[in-house]
Amino acid sequence: MADGSRHLADDGQHLADAQRAHWQSTYTAHPGMYGEAPSAPAVHAAAAFRAAGARDVLELGAGHGRDALHFAREGFTVRAADFSPVGLEQARAAARAQGVAERVTTTVHDVREPLPLPDASVDAVFAHMLLCMALSTKEIHALVDDVRRVLRPGGTFVYTVRHTGDAHYGAGTDHGDDIHEHGGFAVHFFSRALVDALADGWTLDEVHTFEEGELPRRLWRVTQTSPARPV
């Protein structure tokens, strides 16, 4: 059993390392690959964060910063985290060009590790397609638990994920645990049961279905609120 667990861990680390290298090379070859316009989920999240009275936002998986910069332009103080130094350097350059550098800080961070922030230190957290990267179910649960830790009581978490109704679900290389690799990108496709499990101990405000891109990718936008008091 121990050998089997070690084998699974080794496979997961190998996939994580390969995905990090793939994203690094992708950002290097295609600077600002998603353009300057914010994603639709980020536009929604900014409105939701403002309605909740948030002032500071943590974005996980910020990439080259198109959504982090939107939050900054909307008046939020933003910490942008990603495991790609190349992407974050592009984000910093764009922040300087747009005159919002004073509102944006960047942190190179792999979400498989605990978030480098104190408890109850941010008002809102945003993650566009970060949770559905090559993360195991166990790692996703640990990450969401850590998001709740760093959120202030009553804070808002908005995330998006591709789900099992997506056209690429089941295609390409099957890594197990609903993780499938297609075109060099590994995706953990979410079931509704996983969304509900991740909302345990939170208030699940919304699960919104939408599509993005040319395939199109099929996603859920999930909004949930941390408890008003620590639990």
Image (spheres, rainbow, N blue to C red):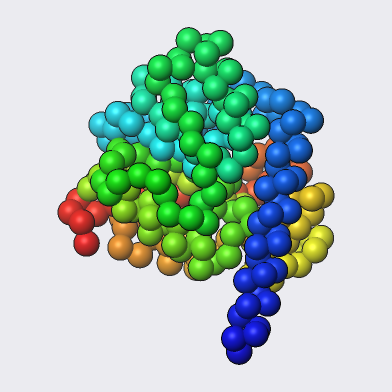
In depth, the one of 172 and 48 nearer the eye is 172
Q: Residue at x 48, y 55 (%)?
A: 113
For the C terminus, the image quarter is bottom left
Residue 48 position, x and y percent, is: 36, 35
Q: Position of residue 116 (x, y in %)?
A: 40, 46
Q: Is residue 74 above or below residue 169?
A: above
Q: Is residue 16 above or below residue 97?
A: below
At x 38% / y 59%, what residue is drawn? 145
Q: How many marks?
A: 0
Q: Position of residue 16 (x, y in %)?
A: 66, 56
Query: Where is the N terminus found, in terms of image quarters?
Result: bottom right
Q: Quadrant of residue 143?
A: bottom left
Residue 151: image x %, image y %? 31, 46
Report the residue at 51% width, 63% height from top. 139
192 sits to left or right of 203: right
Q: Residue furthest left?
A: 229
Quarter of the image where one finds residue 114: bottom left
Identify the residue at horizontal 44%, vertical 24% (top origin): 104
Q: Seen in the image, is 55 located left or right of residue 191? A: left
Is 90 situated above or below 213?
A: above
| Residue 152 in view | yes
Of residues 220 and 197, which is closer to you in this image? 197
Residue 163 shows in this picture:
no
Residue at the limit of the structure toward the bottom, as seen here: 1
